[in-house]
Amino acid sequence: MDPVGNASDCNETAVPANCSDGFNQFVQPVWQITLWAVAYCGMVAVSVVGNVVVVWIILAHKRMRTVTNYFLVNLALAEAAMSAFNTVINFAYAVHNEWYFGLVYCRFHNFFPIAAIFASIYSMTAIALDRYMAIIHPLGQRLSSTQTRVVIGVMWMLALLLAFPQYHYSSTALLPGRTVCYIDWPEYTTLDFKKIYYVCVTLLIYFLPLCIMGCAYTSVGVTLWASAIPGDSSDHYKEQLIAKRKVVKMMIVVVCTFAVCWLPYHVYFLLHQFFPDLFEQRYMQQVYLAVLWLAMSSTMYNPIIYYCLNSRFRAGFQQAFCCCAPTAVKEELELKSPREHMPSKSDGDCRFCRCRPSSSSSGAQSGGAALVWPSQPATLGGHIQRPPPRAVQPPSRVTCCGG
């Protein structure tokens, strides 16, 4: 996003007169810069690594490639890219108030964050609507994988279109002592294009999607939590309901985290447009760095939330960071049913062993095929239609561990 006057008007709009002498009043002591650098670099490292692992977990495991998870991939890619390409640059510019990276990157620096934030929050909105359709209207038509990719493509096209004015009007100016990156907005006599644009951006990438997600998750929450699980419900029904609740809870935490992290930034952002004189004080540099860090830190929380609240992502992270991950972890990630897991010499315990068939089993007595339910398809909480049972020949000898 536009550098929002990194505590100085030298960074946006036409270069003001008070910057023409090249004086930089926002110089900080070395110890403050060091502390902020550690905070920003640590946040970027966690964000990039965590989101890349999320992408790997979904794309490297075929059964994780669901409609909802494709939107999570889009969300992770947008957040990792924004962390890698903008956060450190924005920090350096905020600290030194001097642009070292040329006109091309100046335009990219002002253009890409709006597009990435748009893609991020509307990926979350798409997930909320997908959960709404799956739970409130379970018989309605759902998106296919191809349609999901089309939606993501349209999402990025709209994001780039919204951010294009930031690219078009970005420029650099060489002052007596330094170079600045700013946005040279056109001046009209009848309207303030800059203020209108920024208000529209704030509405489109923050308040509107949050309202949509709030309505969707309220309806979903009432449906999932308002009534208790019937006492005579099947185990399958109970498992599905619990799984849906967990997914919705996880996504609500993701949305609330995003909202809390970005609210101070948007407030700062709008105040700067309407009350620019407030931002000439020296302490505003520290306020800006804190607000910017909080907003950018939203990119690192999602992988942590996935790890804490979703067993499949937890298994994926364990597999990614531990090459000797136990068999149970890999089974969880591949979504194999424990009932189908046969004992092996490497298992080391009986948790997934299937015991010797009873002599009263008709399938075993007749030598016919036994009916086994196939493992469920991977999903992040949608409706699952149970497939018909498939016939398998019983093994000649099935024993428990040590049996």
Image (tube, helix red, strand yellow):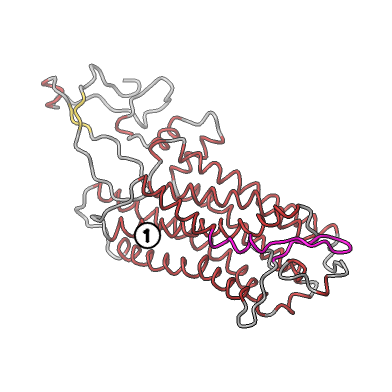
Q: In the image, which residues are magenta?
A: 161-183
Quadrant in which residue 388 is drawn: top left
Q: Can residue 176 be found in the magenta stretch? A: yes
Residue 151 appears left or right of 117: left
Quadrant in which residue 288 is drawn: bottom right
Residue at the disc numbered 1: 129
Rendered location of residue 259, percent (x, y):
53, 65
Q: Amino acid at mark 1?
A: Leu
- Residue at the far bottom in the pictured view: 190
Q: What quarter of the picture does the C terminus occupy? A: top left
Rendered location of residue 174, percent (x, y):
83, 61
- Residue at the far top in the pictured view: 396
Residue 353 appears left or right of 80: left
Q: What quarter of the picture does the N terminus occupy? A: bottom right
Judging depth in this view, the residue of 15 and 82 nearest the camera is: 15
Query: Which residue shows up at 54% across the image and 57% down it?
Result: 160
Q: Can residue 328 be found in the magenta stretch? A: no
Quadrant in which residue 34 is drawn: bottom right
Residue 314, compared with residue 228, is above or below; it is above
